[in-house]
Amino acid sequence: MNRDGQTPLVELRDISIAFGGIKAVDHVSIDLYPGEVVGLLGHNGAGKSTLIKCLSGAYHMDAGEIRVNGEKAHIENPRDARAYNIETIYQTLALADNLDAASNLFLGREIMRNGLVDDAKMEAETRKIMGRLNPNFKKFNDPVSALSGGQRQSVAIARAVYFNARILIMDEPTAALGPHETQMVAELIQELKAQGIGIFLIEHDIHNVMKLCDRASVMKNGQLVGTVNVNEVTDDDILGMIILGKKPAHLAA
Ligand SMILES: Nc1ncnc2c1ncn2[C@@H]1O[C@H](COP(=O)(O)OP(=O)(O)O)[C@@H](O)[C@H]1O
Ligand SMILES: [Mg+2]
């Protein structure tokens, strides 16, 4: 696909990985454009996490190619992925519960001044980025254990964005959230899109897929069933792809 001549942020091309005899990912190709959210769907074991772990550097693909901004990328480990501005927001969020938002944002990458951690500067930077991403966030001086699920999510996202994420991988960001908090994450995602960040979103809830994603790629048994524009399909079309492993008749080529 070529969106108005735009170069994709990410091209996953013909990616395959097997574990023992099992083809976990079998010749899968998916593109991601700037400012776009692509949902990854499919039953447990379909291969979603395995595919995305090739992009995040956690797994090595057996065959295929990953291109970032039109050029072949060499991603051997998570550090390589980060060098391509690829950041993963894990379901666990990987936050230090007893520390506040600023300390979490800069964990391991603290701002130093005269050999000391510059807490004031880190808090100021945190307020600046949260002001953009989640203007209602007020709990700058509480440990993140005191934050709601959505607020914690926003801290994890702020950390990725502060350190220049252009490509975000999110694994079921709304799984543990109520409707109000899910709405907050939806707004956060809109803001990331407006900044041109591309997002791969692993998501089980079809309703959230329709609401949050521009396109949806469905996998089954390691293979790509298809990628659809969500505004051209119904919830049932997508469910059919997940369950039957076929594109809806009106879209089948
Ligand atoms: N590290 C691994 N070792 C062996 N098998 C694995 C490993 N990771 C994933 N798999 C297998 O690959 C297939 C796809 O799994 P996964 O990518 O986790 O699916 P999904 O994320 O869609 O639920 C499954 O059969 C799973 O058991
Ligand atoms: Mg998974």
Image: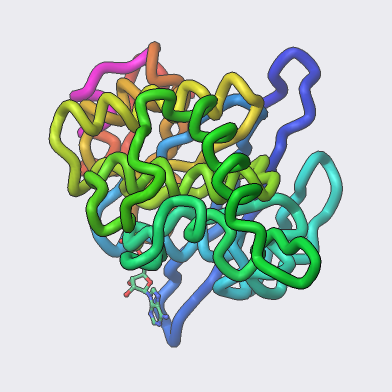
Relative to 153, say whether 92 is above or below.
below
Percent of width and height locating residue 50 = 46, 65
Q: Look at the image and name its color scheme.
A: rainbow
Q: Which residues, given as a range, are shown in magenta?
A: 232-239
Could you tell me which quadrant the N terminus lies in? top right
Q: Is residue 125 left or right of residue 80?
A: left
> Considering depth in this image, is 57 or 146 the residue closer to the camera?
146
What residue do we see at 32% from left, 65% from top? 97
Q: Is residue 40 visible?
A: no
Q: Which corner quadrant of the figure contains ligand 1?
A: bottom left
Q: Main secondary structure of the magenta part?
A: helix
Relative to 5, say whether 217 is above or below.
below
Does the magenta portion include 159?
Answer: no
> Considering depth in this image, is 66 or 192 the residue closer to the camera?
192
Determine the image quadrant of residue 21.
Answer: bottom left
Determine the image quadrant of residue 189.
Answer: top left
Percent of width and height locating residue 45 = 29, 64
What residue do we see at 59% from left, 34% from top? 198
Relative to 112, say whether 125 is above or below.
above
